[in-house]
Image (cartoon, rainbow, N blue to C red):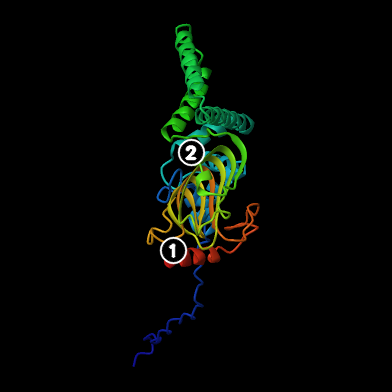
Amino acid sequence: MNDDTPPINNPEPPDQEEPTAPTEVQEPEAAPKRLTRSVSDRMIAGVAGGLGRYFGVDPVMFRIGFVVSLFFGGLGVVAYGLLWLFVPTDGEPDRGERAGGRLRRLGIWRGLGLVLLALIVLGASLVLASIAAFGVAVGWGIPVAATIVVLGIVLVALSFRGGVRWLIAPVVALAVGAGVAAATDLNFRGGIGNRDYQPRSAKAIPADGYKLGIGRLVVDLRDLNWQKQKVVHLDTRLGAGQSNVFVPANVCVVGSTHVGAGESEVVGQLNQGFSVDESPGSATPTATPRLVLDAEVQTGQLRVINSNHASVDNPGYGPGPFHQDTAPLRAAEARACKAG
């Protein structure tokens, strides 16, 4: 054996890798919630849809809130307009977002000044429209129309000398107010104030009924001899305010009632909104004693109270802080109409 042969070295086993601890997977941080106006859930500009998504509630709640705010100074409408201008959409920019961007580029104070000016112009236009509508409703339609015609002629005449564009807004506001009043047959004729009637017999009731333009109308029929007068006809018309008809609990109320905008409380049936129509006693129109009623309120509240003890001065039927249960009125109507 040759001693010069190099020794055979056994190769060292490869280093075994030590087990590594599992690495933690870091979840990406959630992006902060951002208020945007909804493109898919919108009735006007998507403001309520965006607020509902942001706060996790039904957008209908915000829509109702904006509508209710109309009766408390209209602050909700102002807030809606500002959100329309300064809150972006969740899709393609719309007209409001583009207008808001231009206002921001003008600077905050100048932008707010323009918004305030626009709100003043809008408020003044609404006032002029209301004045024109009121004028037509109380029977001053010809003077209102003459004013609009004169302003229109002035506007046309001045247009040949460069025009006065600021005059367009009031002319349009007056025309719109008068047109809406004429189209809806708004009628406030019949006086203003409180009228309280308590006829002692059916013959004392005017053939054309009782009418009032603006105010509170009360017709109390509980002193009639209902055993003698089996059927009594009554017509009432009110432009704006509250109309009240009182009958004994044993009288079946039939006929028709109409409220253009407001609340209807007819023998315990409560409804509110626009164009509210009721047909009480339609199932038993021949029951006696009965009141055949034709009542209309264009704007306000209509109450038909079938109670022997209800006070004409108590406004508490229906929902509200002075709420009284209307179930007894419904029960009395059912008994009276069934008895015939």
Q: Secondary structure at mark 1?
A: helix
Residue identifier under label 2: 97
Q: Earlier in the sequence, mark 1 or mark 2?
A: 2
**From where the camera sits, is residue 30 visible?**
yes
Name the spot of residue 306 as percent of width and height, x first.
54, 59
Name the residue nearer the viewer: 237 or 167. 237
Q: Residues within 10 Å of mark 1 (few under 14, many from 20)?
A: many
Residue 238 seen in the figure: no
Left or right position of 307 against 337 = right
Write down the residue under mark 1.
337
Q: Is residue 150 left or right of residue 220?
A: left
Quadrant in the picture for residue 134? top right
Please, what secondary structure does the residue beneath circle 2 have?
Answer: helix
Identify residue type, mark 2: Glu
Q: Looking at the image, how many numbered discs can be counted on the residues?
A: 2
Residue reaching furthest to the left:
1
Q: Nearer the viewer, residue 177 or 340?
A: 340
Residue lying at 50% horizontally and 22% vertically, measured from the top left: 144
**Numbered badge on residue 137:** none
Measure how far apart labels 1 and 2 are at the Cα level: 59 Å
Residue at position x 44%, y 34% from top?
Answer: 185
- Residue 338 in the image, given as x and y percentages of width and height: 42, 67
Three-letter residue code for mark 1: Cys
